[in-house]
Amino acid sequence: MKRNSYQEQDGDDDAYDKFQRLVGIESVKKKFDEFSSLDELNHHREKMGQQIGGFSLHSLFINVIN
């Protein structure tokens, strides 16, 4: 996955790297990546003066673990 510009780039393990190494929660990781991509898109749209899509930063993951 492409890393967002606001994530650490210093080579140390950041929270995202640690999260990605967790085993057995692929569907949660996928949903997180979708939220992250939408956030980055909204950031670029906002910088260009375009309307941004809204989404809640609060999520509840129920029965997403396969």
Image: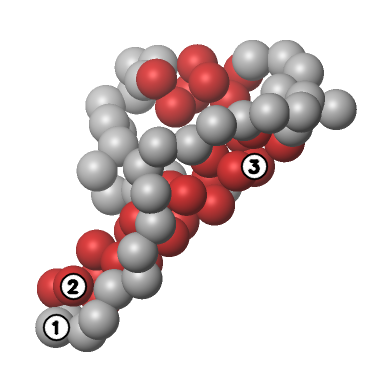
Q: Residue 24: x and y, percent?
A: 77, 18
Give neighbour class at mark 1: few <14, some 14-19, many 20+ (Cα, 10 Å): few
Mark 1 in CB contact with mark 2 (< 8 angstroms): yes
* Residue position marked by numbered label 3 in the rendering: 30
What mark, if any, has residue 62 been given in the picture?
A: none
Which amino acid is tagged 3? Lys
Q: Residue 7: x and y, percent?
A: 30, 37
Which amino acid is tagged 2? Glu
Instruction: Using the numbered discs, state the Cα–Cα distance from disc 3 to disc 1 in whole angstroms.
Output: 29 Å
Dot 3 or dot 1, earlier in sequence = 3
Instruction: Using the numbered discs, state the Cα–Cα distance from disc 1 to disc 2 in whole angstroms.
Output: 5 Å
Image height of 20 relative to 5, above or below: above
Q: Residue 8: x and y, percent?
A: 27, 31
- Occupied quadrant, residue 6: top left
Dot 3 or dot 2, earlier in sequence = 3
Instruction: Using the numbered discs, state the Cα–Cα distance from disc 3 to disc 2 in whole angstroms.
Output: 24 Å
Q: Is residue 27 visible?
A: yes
Q: Residue at x 60, y 43 (%)?
A: 31
Q: Residue at x 22, y 84 (%)?
A: 50
- Occupied quadrant, residue 55: bottom left
Give neighbour class at mark 2: few <14, some 14-19, many 20+ (Cα, 10 Å): few
| Mark 1, secondary structure of its residue | loop
Give neighbour class at mark 3: few <14, some 14-19, many 20+ (Cα, 10 Å): few
Q: Residue at x 45, y 56 (%)?
A: 37
* Residue position marked by numbered label 1 in the rendering: 49
What mark, if any, has residue 46 been given in the picture?
A: 2
